[in-house]
Amino acid sequence: MPNAIRTRGATPPALTPATVGIATRLTAEGTRSPLLAALLTVLAVCGGDAVARIFPFGPRHRAVNDLANQFVPFHAHLWDLLRGRADGGLLLDWQAGWGTSFLPDYGTYVSSPFAPLVALYPRGDIEYAVYGITVLKTAVAAAAMTYLLRRLGPGTWWWASVLGASYALCGWSLAEGTYNPMWLDGLIAFPLLCLVGEWVREGRRPLLGPLVVAVCWVANFYTAYMATIGAVLVLVVRLLAVPRTLPAAASAVRTLLRAGLTTGIGVALSAPVLVPVFLGSRHAHPGLVREFDPAPATDVLARLLPVTYSFSTPAAFVSTAVLLLVAALLFRREIPGRDRLLWAGLCVAVLASMQWGPTHLLWHAFATPNGSPYRQTFVLSGVLVLAAWTGFAHGLPDRRALLGGTAVVVALSLGSLPSPFLTSWALVLTAVGLVAVAGALLLPRRGRYGVLAALLVAGTVVGQAAATTAYADRERLVRLDDYPPWGAGQQRRADALAAADGWPAYRTDSGLPRVAGNDPLLLGGQGAAYYSSHTPAVLTETLTALGGGWTSRGRNLLSLDNPVTDALFGVGARWRDGEVVRAEPSAPPLPLVTVRPPGPAPAYGRSPFRNQELLLGTRVYEAPGAGGACRVGTEVFLWAPDATGPARLGAYETRLLGGQPKRRAALTSLGTQQREGAKPQVPPGGTAEIACLDHDRLRTAVAGLRARAATRIDVRSDGLTATLPPGVTGTAVVAAPRIAGWRCEGGTAGSYGGLLAVDVRPGTTTVTCAFRPPGLRAGLAAGAAGALLLAGSLWLGARTRRRAEG
């Protein structure tokens, strides 16, 4: 049988291209290897979570960092879109950030083929849905790698399963991918793209190859980019392994050209999503710019072992079985020296490239990421697994090779001893795993001994991965920001917001305290809160000018609870103090579109109170009197963006959380001035400004704007149409940020204090604005070009084959 293990130390028969093709086709048959790999993966992940007593197997929650802030809310919004309950559509999201482009967020967070599975769950079980998809993606990655291994060459089927599971259960997957589930599509993409490389090398699957590339890039372009680099390196090694002859060199060049064409077509097919994502990043508020700082060598070695955790070092653990097989490869004389040198060199080269600044930037699309700087580590894990499998084409390692490989693994472990990330469990599990795997490799292959060997190796992989999962679960809750999980309180809040919803007549704000960074997507409503890699710069600037607060250096925008901004943005209900508070009947919210008198657009200054008045068109704030106290009956507001701590006025108290550049506290109410002379107590730190809001003036100003507001507004998933009162002229202002992509009345839309605006000339009765994400048209054109190129290549290939047959 092609997948039978040869006697240790025996010289393999010569392999011709024909026999290699037959062997690979035979070894690719059957589903038991991928299914076993998937089963081992699910057992390890769920078992580790159960040991850690973390959701959904215990009281500890998983709601940390971007998992809570972005991924769960965006999957909830996708649920709403699929069920027809969202305000907006694929192009425009009316719920978050007062109205933002959704296609870039879709392409970044929920374009995975697995993401629509959330619609199979109840809306209240969205966290269960995201967890289930996370486990499923990890299992599919194991199955995909297992299939690839059997496709590459002969070997025992269960060894392919445990090595495929080892890849899916690598440290990167367990420590980082599990709470960044969109990255797990890259974990699946690497073996799939390597498989495409094999098809290209053999001149097969000319249609399926580009389609697989396109699906991988649409699912998550960021990690697919890294997986593509890794797959290209693997293909180069596979081509260099062929003896150096002139025909072989010419064939290799043709293969690389075909691979480039296949990849180019696939990326072009993904362009309708990819280009808007790219341009969305260009229009986004700038994030943190960091300099790359390579991790110490001892820390890198420590992360090769199980049960370690760190946010700023590569999570390179990939089971002791893989380490031993790769190390033993160096000592196997029966394997051609070219193969050993190429695969060992590839492993070292990928690891070294992660530590060198220029290649670090290449791996991350020439921008050091804001967060974990080793996001390409899964490629290293995949390369190690492929190298481990390479030796099986020549049988099992003999005792000499095992002894040498064991010595290498022991040396690596000893080299990690100075690292602060090393744990005692890491050393214990490495030692136990080393003994178990080495013993399994020395056992006879038949009967009960074969079963025992399989149990030893599978037990090592599952046990080490489960322990690493449990350790990472615990450490994340200690080291990362965590947020309240979905529960009865959040469900009650969502139900109350849904009951008060009146869109598009008025907005309902999800309010404070926040649950996560995208509460409007998670809880409902149409508020200012928004957190994304694509948070528009104009939105952050406008919200900041009006007194809004944020975290994550301006990309995580908070709800702004203020009567003036509520009036300006048509907020008719908001969550406050444990209940939904509706606007006063005497001051109903403004429509989404109002017409301002002719005149220049407001130019914002330093004071958010003055900026609000400029946008409103009327003075509504008073300066505090002598001694810093407001007039009795006015509402006292404090703006102290850099302050942290309690602020008080009489019995009323609120807490501020500021401190640039990471955080900015929003202006906040200190309640109504009850007695003359009472002064606010402000925490120290930076600038502080007090202003006194006269609600009577505000009601008068709102009434004046309402008289010039649209009488009818039709909101669509790609724009809006407003009917204006007869005879009005000036500037029609839409209470939505003027983000790139808006066009009104056949021309480019204007800006009025950061909001979407259109000139209203005499005789104008309607205003129509449409939104198209920047890059969508170019992306569609590139996609069409890719489809034409694919069709042309298929036609040319078919014609060439017909001529050859003739």
Image: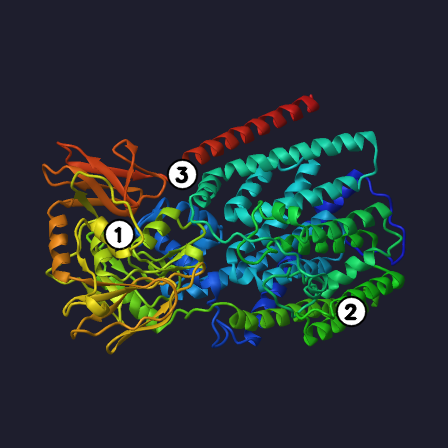
Disc nearer the start of the sequence (3/2)? 2
In the displayed structure, does residue 408 sit left or right of residue 761?
Answer: right
**Residue 227 in view here:** no
- Judging by the rendered image, the residue that carries numbered circle 3 is 774
Does 246 sit above or below residue 112? above
Q: Colour scheme used in the picture? A: rainbow
The picture places residue 193, in percent across and down from the top left corner, at 62, 45
Query: Around disc 3, counting alpha carbons within 10 Å, would you say few (fewer than 14), some (14 to 19), or many (20 or more)?
Result: many
How many numbered discs, if any? 3
Percent from the top left, x then y, of residue 391?
80, 54
* Amino acid type, mark 1: Asn
Give me the C-alpha separation between circle 1 and circle 2: 62 Å
- Crowd rating for badge 2 (residues with CA inside 10 Å; few <14, some 14–19, many 20+): some
Q: In front of the other: label 1 or label 2?
A: 1
Residue wearing tag 1: 611
Q: Residue at x 61, y 33 (%)?
A: 261
Is 632 left, or right, of 222 in this rendering?
left
- Of 571 and 780, which appears nearest the observer? 571
Query: Of the residues tagged 3 and 1, which is closer to the observer?
Result: 1
Residue 203 quadrant: top right
Residue 651, horizontal then vertical, whole percent: 24, 78
Q: Label 3 vs label 1: CA separation?
A: 29 Å
Q: Which mark is residue 414?
A: 2
Instruction: Tell me: residue 742, above or below residue 669.
Output: above
Is residue 805 something that shows in the picture? yes
Is the C terminus in the top left, top right, bottom left or bottom right quadrant? Answer: top right
